[in-house]
Image (cartoon, rainbow, N blue to C red):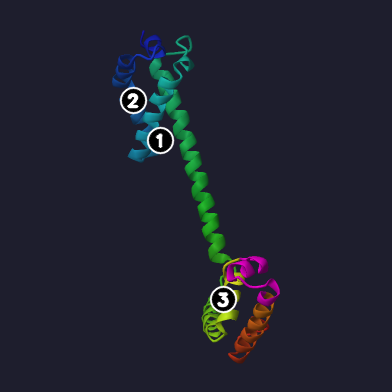
Amino acid sequence: MLAMAIARYEHGALAETYKRHAGAVYSLAHRLLIEQSLAEDVVQEVFLRLWNDPTRFDPGRGTMRSYLLTQTHGRSVDLLRSNTARRAREQRQASATAESDYDLELEVWDLATSDQVRRSLEVLPASERRAINLAYFGGYTYREVAALLGEAEGTVKTRIRAGLRRLRSALSDAGLTTEDH
């Protein structure tokens, strides 16, 4: 009996079972899933499950063919449900993104502001610019900035505060203030 030989992990028994039943397994999977690649994946998974756990087949409950077709049907339905749920989730996310408060004017404003911030940073003294870049764009703490620059923490804080005042003033002069948006 092939099932017992598969349980003893005899490759020939699995090959013979595959030869006898793979066509029916594939046909059912393809009929349910439509896509060839998904049907092939299901066939592989069904036979791999049989190989990995042959004791799941109970000859007292039916034939090997009916067992394999039942496994194929179950796995195909699971795959269909999973794909349907994934597509619905992706559609909800796409819809939420499209319907969210996407504001082209705000996006353009943000780009213009970031360009102006870059230009304003360039006119700051190098010591203030380095400290601000490390703290705000590098994510370092005042203490870490001080260590990286080899300077006292108080000096770094003073430079950052002075640089931010100059930056705020330059952005205000350019008409870019946080009160506008």
Q: Which residue is mark 2?
A: 24
Query: How many residues crowd around disc 3 within 10 Å: few (fewer than 14), some, or many (20 or more)?
Result: some
**Which is closer to the viewer, label 1 or label 3?**
3
Q: Is residue 115 above or below residue 43?
A: below
Q: Is residue 59 above or below residue 52?
A: above
> Toward the viewer: 120 or 110?
120
Quadrant for residue 67, please give it: top left
CA gap, disc 1 to disc 3?
Answer: 62 Å
Q: Is residue 33 above or below residue 51?
A: below
Left or right: residue 97 versus residue 146 is left
> Toward the viewer: 153 or 166?
153
Give yes or no for residue 74 being in the magenta stretch. no
Q: What amino acid is at disc 3?
A: Arg
Query: How many residues crowd around disc 2 within 10 Å: few (fewer than 14), some, or many (20 or more)?
Result: some
Q: Main secondary structure of the magenta part?
A: helix
Sequence-wise first label, 2 or 3 = 2
If the image is split into quadrants, where does the C terminus sit?
A: bottom right
If the image is split into quadrants, where does the N terminus sit?
A: top left
Q: What amino acid is at disc 1?
A: Leu
The residue depicted at 58 percent of the width and 90 percent of the height is: 174
Q: Which residue is mark 3?
A: 130
CA gap, disc 2 to disc 3?
Answer: 70 Å
Q: Tell me residue 129's x, y (percent).
A: 57, 79
Q: Is residue 2 above or below residue 22?
A: above
State which region is magenta.
140-156
Name of the residue lying farthest toward the right: 154
CA gap, disc 1 to disc 2?
Answer: 12 Å
The residue depicted at 30 percent of the width and 15 percent of the height is: 12
**Which is closer to the viewer, label 2 or label 3?**
3
Quadrant for residue 131, please give it: bottom right
